Image (cartoon, grey):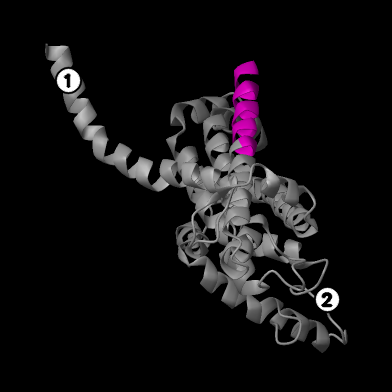
Amino acid sequence: MNWLSRRRHFTLMIAPAFILYTMYMVYPIVYSIYYSFTDFDGVSSAKFAGASHYREMVQDTIFWTSMRNTGIILGIAVLLLIPLGFLLAVLLSGNVKGSAIMRPLVFAPAIVAPILVGLIWIFILDPKIGLVNAFLQSLGIAAGPMWIGGSTLSPYSIAFVFLWQQIGFLVTIFYAGLRMLPRDVMEASALDGASRIQQLRYIQIPMLQETFGIVTALVVTNVFKIFELVFALTGGGPVHLSEVMVSYMYHITFTQLQYSYGMALAVVIFLFGAVVSALTLFGLRRRATAR
C-alpha cells in the first residue's frame, strides 16, 4: 500500500507536465500528420488525399533548394559552431585576464530575439547599405559580394549569423561542463607531466562526451527551427533561392494558404530533425562506449 501511495503521488506530480506536453507537443504532431494526408483549405471539411502532397514534394524544386540550404547551415553549424564553442569555453575557463568580463559578452547575443538579430545584421551584410561592403568600397573594391539576397552566398551568411547568435549559449553549456570536472584528476595529470593539450585531448574531451551529445542535439534541432533569421535577412528571396525548410513551410502555409501541403512539409521537417538528432546521439554514445 505504501508503494501504491508513492506511485499515486508520483503520477499526480507529473500529470500537469504530461498534460501540457500532450497539448502542445503530441497533439500538434498528430494533427499535422492527419491533415498532411488531406485536402484542407482551413474552412471547409478536410477530404482524404492520400500521399499526394508527399509526391508533390518530391517534384517541388523549391523544397529541394530549401533542404539544400538547411543542409549547408547544418554542416557549418556542426563543423564550426560546436568546436569553436568548446574551444572558447576552454579559453574562458582558464586563468585568462578579462575572462570574467568576456563571459557575459559572449553570451549576450543568445538572449537577443532572432528577428532583432536579423535586423541588426541587415545593416552589416546588406549589399547596398551594409557596413561590410562599405568597408570594401573604402579599400577600392567597387562592387562587393551579394552577402544576402543573392543566389550563392545567402545560406552561408545565414549560417554565419546563426553561429554568432548561438555560440554564446553553447559556450555556457561547455563552460558549466568544464567546471564540473573533478579538479583532482586535472591536478594529478599535471603532476604526471601532462601538457595542457594532453589534458584537453585525453581527459576533458572524453569526460565531456555527454555534454557534446547534448550540444549536438541542440544545434541540430535549432538549425531545423531557423525561421526568423531568414525572414529578416532575405525573406527567402530572391525567388525562394535562400529559403530554408521552415521558412518555405511558412510561405506555403500562411502565404499560399496551402494548409495540407504545409502540414506535409512540417511533418518532413519534424522527421528530418528527429532522425538526424537520433543518429547523432547514437553515434556519440557508441563512440563513448567504445572508449
Is residue 193 among what the camera can see?
no
Is residue 54 or residue 182 the one in the foreground?
54
- Could you say which quadrant of the image residue 65 lies in? bottom right
Q: Are marks 1 and 2 in contact (CB under 8 Å)?
A: no
Q: Identify the secondary structure beneath mark 1.
A: helix
**Does residue 259 belong to the magenta stretch?**
no
Q: Nearer the viewer, mark 1 or mark 2?
A: 1
Residue type marked 1:
Arg
- Could you say which quadrant of the image residue 153 lies in? bottom right
Q: Identify the secondary structure beneath mark 2.
A: loop
Label 1, label 2: how far apart the Cα atoms are:
65 Å
Q: Position of residue 44 (x, y in %)?
A: 49, 60
Side of 16 relative to 88 (left or right): left
Q: Is 87 drawn above or below residue 11 in the view shown?
A: below
Q: Determine which of the numbered discs, if any, sits on residue 6 in the image.
A: 1
Is residue 195 or residue 86 the one in the foreground?
86
Mark closer to the chain start, 1 or 2: 1
Residue that sits furthest to the top in the current view: 1
Is residue 180 or residue 142 the one in the foreground?
142
Q: Residue at x 65, y 73 (%)?
A: 233
Q: Residue at x 43, y 41 (%)?
A: 26
Side of 25 relative to 270 (left or right): left
Q: How many marks?
A: 2
Q: Position of residue 222 (x, y in %)?
A: 57, 51
Residue type marked 2:
Pro
Q: Determine which of the numbered discs, if any, sits on residue 145 in the image.
A: 2
Magenta residues (range): 275-290
Characterize the local packing of mark 2: few (<14), some (14-19) or many (20 or more) Cα atoms within 10 angstroms. Answer: some
